[in-house]
Image (tube, coloured by chain):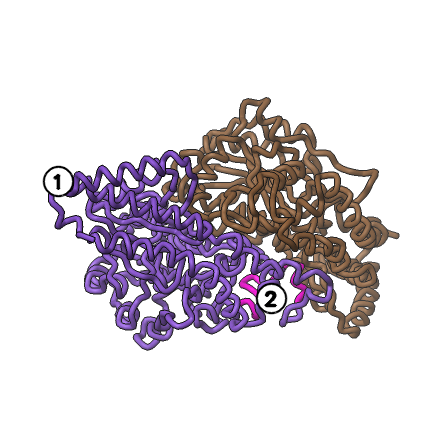
Chain colours: A purple, B brown
Amino acid sequence: MKAYVEMSKEELMKEKEELMKKYKEYQDLNLSLDMSRGKPGNEQLDISLDMLGIINDKESMKCEQGIDIRNYGVLDGLNEAKELIGAMVECPPENVIVYGNSSLNIMYDTISRSYTHGVMGSTPWCKLDKVKFLCPVPGYDRHFAITEHFGIEMIEVPMTENGPDMDMVEELVSKDDSIKGIWCVPKYSNPQGVSYSDETVIRFANLKPAAQDFRIYWDNAYAIHHLYEDKQDKLLNIVEECEKAGNPHMVYIFCSTSKVTFPGSGIAGLAASTENLKYIRKQMTIQTIGHDKINQLRHIKYFKNIDGMIAHMKKHAEIIRPRFETVMDALENELVPLGIISYIKPNGGYFISVDTLEGCAKRTVGLCKEAGVVMTGAGATYPYGNDKKDTNIRIAPTYPSVEELKLASDIFVLCVKIASVEKLLNA
Amino acid sequence: MKAYVEMSKEELMKEKEELMKKYKEYQDLNLSLDMSRGKPGNEQLDISLDMLGIINDKESMKCEQGIDIRNYGVLDGLNEAKELIGAMVECPPENVIVYGNSSLNIMYDTISRSYTHGVMGSTPWCKLDKVKFLCPVPGYDRHFAITEHFGIEMIEVPMTENGPDMDMVEELVSKDDSIKGIWCVPKYSNPQGVSYSDETVIRFANLKPAAQDFRIYWDNAYAIHHLYEDKQDKLLNIVEECEKAGNPHMVYIFCSTSKVTFPGSGIAGLAASTENLKYIRKQMTIQTIGHDKINQLRHIKYFKNIDGMIAHMKKHAEIIRPRFETVMDALENELVPLGIISYIKPNGGYFISVDTLEGCAKRTVGLCKEAGVVMTGAGATYPYGNDKKDTNIRIAPTYPSVEELKLASDIFVLCVKIASVEKLLNA
């Protein structure tokens, strides 16, 4: 295959003609495919079904603490649930609070609480003139949506294959005390599937922020979400590194079982230093009497411990690996040789992130849509939905079947080619 | 029996001596009884057990909308869940949002959202110098805790047997635009068990608040929680009355199944006008991807409809009625004739509220504690925990067994007598 940049105008025009012919053929099929949603497919949902019936009589209603879990009480989670969530993110159970069904909700709450009541006694953010957050890009749109909702100014930090650009992070947080946090998905990041290197984690732990209430918002959403048995990314323990660095209070860790058991019916947790949790519990006593303990016990009885959960994750991997590979094969065989995309092969997580030639992402997504393939909106991976170079596209390969994905990948590949040829012709 | 106020000093001293002798006998029993907690007893928890196993295979996973409820999606609740929650509070399903496991959490969220983002476009409360709430007293301590947490000034409004003193409510809200809300438990109120009269509801609906963002926080926690078949309080529909009065946006209604199925593992909802819900959903899209739909469907399949739920509530009534009557009999036979308490007999709800002679509540609760009976702290039913006259005590009769309640009531009665005699002797 000849790289597009090496093609003459004539070659490009000929290529375009052929591509458009194929594109019309796809359009005529009136397809309806979707690679936009980072949600488990039906097969994945089936493997957790047995959890639902596991608590169904009086005898199963006691937890380790001897409490009847059907009744009120236990503000911050059952001990066994703290152990399970703690093990997912390698934190001791006493540093974990177990919440309801959604880590997104915990992150919202955490920002909202900081906005209304400050962080460990600091000035509430609503009383400050300016609050800023660092946002590694490309990143997770729902993170950006929360900070935008609270009027927090977002500063982009480029991602590298080792994590965020740490020179820039260090420089910014040490100089500007209005910077109160940074959003991180440190393992199998959304959308690139990048895991932060040891050096990156250590540099995070050793930050010297100007703001005392600066926190690292460590959304460890894909902590155990590996694709392969033999290629698993390892993430250094940020809590231990923060302690070593004398910054024990600088990190909040978020995680959930949404993509382990059931999205929307899992359990979620927050891990942080004892001092952080003290302040958070103070708010929680006002906010709730406690989260769903029956659902916590369901998870505990079903998995028994982290080993049970890891074994369970292998079943997920077997289901989603062929899907990831279908998309990656198409990218590798059809686009990489043409020199019109760059992407990183993820070893886990829920997404594949593609960077097109500059100015081609929106056009590609638009072309896909017109051919019946819904993609995540271009720009979604940037704060304010604004990908200035217009290059990044997030692909979510888990929900469709392998057959659907083959077809959708073919169409996606075709659309990237068309957008690239158009761009080069107009250059 | 001779009323205490009619007794001579000598008679009172003799009475005290006898009471103290009995009190010592109880103390020697080293009891550990609890009438402090408004939570269902174990028998009540057992009657909902069958709900837990009701969803356990793939076939039960579809809702009316045809959605697989195990996956992400459905921000504001399944249609059938909206119908069920709507029927509990007599609102159309389209005016209902179904949340997670706790109406308290919805109320917290509602205040927090108003604080950070205002109400239907109004100025966020955090940007105002002063925000005030009206608090009918005695009332629910967790309501007061939320408003206190957000630095909202609380103004007491006395309860009558028809609801809050509406002359005072009308006067205050029409004059002061910093008054943004009023906490109400309109049916079988916490703690008195009072249901608001038709006139009260109509006057609420016709309020002319100075603040555009004034809302009635209508916590209909005990909407279907009757004690009797033949004596059931009726509550006028506030939504309809507000519409008639041209105030459709003035009320938020909260409710949950915490005391229908399982505390902590029920479902909760908010009902309000379409315009209110539009703003609330806007925030919800940032806050969550959706609440636990599997648990919603559990409730739907178990109850089928509101009739199923009402039939279920009769089972609860049969269990708790003898408990309420045990306490009320003791009050009626032992304290009322002495002229040292006043109380209202509730027809539903979870509490009995007793008013002692002035200055006797704390002493009574203290005496109870020393004799092994835990009561809700005196003052808890007032904002800032401050019952200036020190008269109100909340009794929660649902959790202990009837035998335990008999003993606990005897001790409570004795302690009220001792505190009253002491007070009269010191007068």
Which amino acid type is shown beneath numbered disc 1? Glu
Can the viewer see residue A425? yes
Judged left or right of residue B267, residue A26 is left
Q: Chain of mark 1?
A: A
Q: Nearer the viewer, residue A42 or B192?
A: A42
Q: Residue at x 75, y 39 (%)?
A: B307
Is residue A219 on the magenta stretch? no
Q: CA distance from mark 1 to mark 2?
A: 63 Å
Helix, strand or loop at mark 1? helix
Q: Chain of mark 2?
A: A
Q: Nearer the viewer, residue B353 or A326?
A: A326
The image position of residue A261, as x and y in percent, is 53, 59
Q: Residue at x 34, y 63 (%)?
A: A186
Give the residue number, with chain letter if any, for mark 1. A10
Is residue A72 on the magenta stretch? yes
Judged left or right of residue A426, residue A204 is right
Magenta span dominant secondary structure: loop
Judged left or right of residue B366, residue B124 is left
Give the residue number, with chain letter if any, for mark 2. A302
Q: Is the C terminus of chain B in the top left, top right, bottom left or bottom right quadrant?
A: bottom right
The image position of residue B135, as x and y in percent, is 57, 42
Judged left or right of residue B183, residue B368 is right
Q: Earlier in the sequence, mark 1 or mark 2?
A: 1
Which amino acid type is shown beneath numbered disc 2? Tyr
Q: Which residues are magenta?
A: A67-82
Helix, strand or loop at mark 2? helix
Quarter of the view holding residue A333: bottom left
Q: Nearer the viewer, residue B95 or B398?
A: B95
Mark 1 or 2, closer to the camera: 1
Q: Nearer the viewer, residue A230 or A254?
A: A230
Task: Please state the total of marks drawn on the protein image.
Answer: 2
